[in-house]
Amino acid sequence: MARQPGPGDRPTVKDVALAANVSPTTVSRVLAGNYPVSTATRARVMKAVRELDFVINAQARALGGGNTKTVAFIVHDLVGPSHAYVGQGVERQATAEGRLCLVCTTHGDPQRERELIDVMREQQAEAVVMVGGGSNDEAYVEQMIQTARALDKSGSRLVLCGRPPLGSDVPATVVEYDNEGGAFAMTSYLISLGHRDIVFLGAGEPGYTTIDGRFRGFVRAHESHHIPVAPQRRATIPFDRESGYLATRDLLAGGRTFTAIFAVTDVVASGALVALREAGLRVPEDVSLVGYDDIPLALDVTPTLTTVHVDHEELGRTAVRLALHREQHALSQHTVIGTHVVIRDSAGPPPRAV
Amino acid sequence: MARQPGPGDRPTVKDVALAANVSPTTVSRVLAGNYPVSTATRARVMKAVRELDFVINAQARALGGGNTKTVAFIVHDLVGPSHAYVGQGVERQATAEGRLCLVCTTHGDPQRERELIDVMREQQAEAVVMVGGGSNDEAYVEQMIQTARALDKSGSRLVLCGRPPLGSDVPATVVEYDNEGGAFAMTSYLISLGHRDIVFLGAGEPGYTTIDGRFRGFVRAHESHHIPVAPQRRATIPFDRESGYLATRDLLAGGRTFTAIFAVTDVVASGALVALREAGLRVPEDVSLVGYDDIPLALDVTPTLTTVHVDHEELGRTAVRLALHREQHALSQHTVIGTHVVIRDSAGPPPRAV
DNA sequence: TTGTAAGCGTTATCAG
DNA sequence: CTGATAACGCTTACAA
């Protein structure tokens, strides 16, 4: 009597081989398509596959063959507008390269991050893409270096998105966008409009590299125009809408003068916008407001937001592409993706007199 | 001489066993923690694990033990605001249940969808969560039923999010939100404000279940108030901002009268808002505008959008929870998640005379 | 072109 | 509490 498949019981290569009157080896070869097999045999095998509704066992395949065809994507959060686009880029490129995409979130917890990397080592992910500003803290960086080495030893590749390189002797791929350059360009734009008193809104924990880069560009633009940087309110705030709102309200209540606000992200800018509106200030007539990221929200607010465009999806795609096609001898890779100012309606010349 | 580990070469349980002077079995037991092991032995094993920087091979474990601890998430698109939140729910619940999350996108291609399901069968995902309106097409549904059975046979579980059940004899879990109820409530709200000529904006391909439900609620509300449904422009449009914009512009150009627009999603509403503003119409003084989904955008636009709240994240969480904890004998499961109207600033009474 | 047999790294079974 | 040994399902030399 034939084998009675129970529930949760799948046919195996052996079953197919039996049904097609060939050896398991032949079945494997037909399925992999990497070895000559006679047309007749192939047909018989395929027929058996169809009849048994056979699907191969990926785990077993990986064990026997080697490769898991899997890319991991570790991110702060799935729903942040920019992160989602990076994720989309990762997923698309992974798919384009015939890989599957494993996704995990850390919610900013370094401990969790560390755990996840080990999980990905267990999973033998071909590449581990980490997205979002990590900290610049020395111990943290050191640990990242260990991680990169550990992954490298496992035949995997660490990819850092939006973080600075770990060093040329560390096996990792780094893809970042030009935070400083974009902030420099945007600040210069505001200065060229006539602004001399610009608030940089949103500091974040010192050491968070994305923000640091943006602030650096902000300062450098002032310097290169020989304009003193007005005193900034560099308090740590989470980068959400609410923080932008509260920080701006505080600013207004504190009597601090300014003619423009450079929000560290579009989301923060949207919060600021609400606070400004509540205070009866018109944008851009009374105050100019600009953001960073150019997420869809930038078009949804009124007025539309002048911001720095970042191609988040490309960031994700590039991350995967580089990780998968790295040259044998490229130990450390580093790519910078350009950013540029997108002029919309939220910034204009400062009012005549403040 | 000891084994010289090369690149891409990981220590195995055997290596750990050797280093700790125990059998591989013991190592396995220590790692799994599901079997009594003496404290001393455990300590020795853990020490070896640390020294060798050993991480277990998940593929091998799955092969030997059975379970992959993996949940798959198949979705139209990662960046759609509602989808991203569902994804977040799936990921969070999966993580909470100690599972990993595999994510793939279909971009609405049923062929690709089919392929992905087979890929997930290969991966032995414990659950396959499909998100987003599939079609109601008979052949499609029939294929879904096959799929559900195939997954069931593989010991996996099909979860449909936001689609109607496939039948009580089909092994699948269905989680949907109450599209019809929400639309009914919202339409009733508009009617109670005095509106009698409401446009339903955004039809989608007939058969797309999410939209159908919403339109049904729209019609039913009219019926229950004994108000004739004004002729609707039910053209197929993609549900993006642009379509909302164009459709509204056409509507305005076509001379169609109305006092309110019920946009099928918030995104479509945001497009409509732009078109209305361009036409010099004030919202809500001249025209009321409501949406559906309550995504963050609803708070970003001016005026803030009156809309139907849907807890997308809960949808994702519920999907995973049900799939993982289904009762042994529950062949078909079906859960409906409630929706409710959120009143903001974009809807008011109709103008006195049109 | 096809088949045989030996792994891949882990867990489960069955003895001690 | 610990250890052999046989799976798990597939691939890949090595033979034929």
Image (spheres, coloured by chain):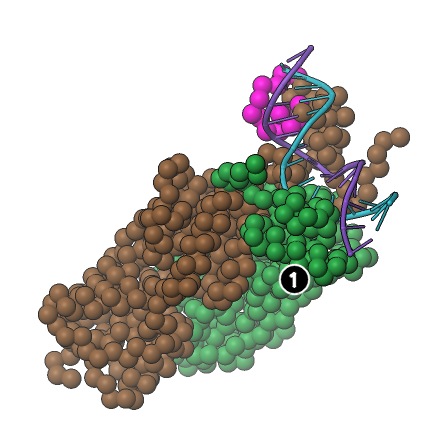
Chain colours: A green, B brown, C purple, D cyan
Side of B147 relative to B23 (left or right): left
The kind of secondary structure element at disc 1 is loop
Chain for mark 1?
A
Q: Position of residue B321 (x, y in %)?
A: 41, 43
Q: Quadrant of the C terminus of chain A?
A: bottom left
Residue picked out by circle 1: A97
A352 drawn magenta: no
Which residue is found at the position 31% from the left and 55% from the top? B177
Whether A302 is drawn above or below A4: the answer is below
Q: Nearer the viewer, residue A181 or B289?
A: B289
Q: Nearer the viewer, residue A263 or A336?
A: A336
Residue at (47% x, 53% y) in the render: B147
What main secondary structure does the magenta stretch of the protein show? helix
Question: Quadrant location of residue B239?
Answer: bottom left
> Going 21% across and 84% down the picture, which residue do you hit?
B257
The percent position of residue A157, horizontal first and vertical second, equals: 70, 52
Q: Is residue B157 above or below residue A163?
A: above
Q: Which residues are magenta?
A: B26-40
The location of residue B167, given as percent across then percent down, is 34, 52
Q: Position of residue B115 (x, y in %)?
A: 55, 59
Q: Is residue B58 visible?
A: yes
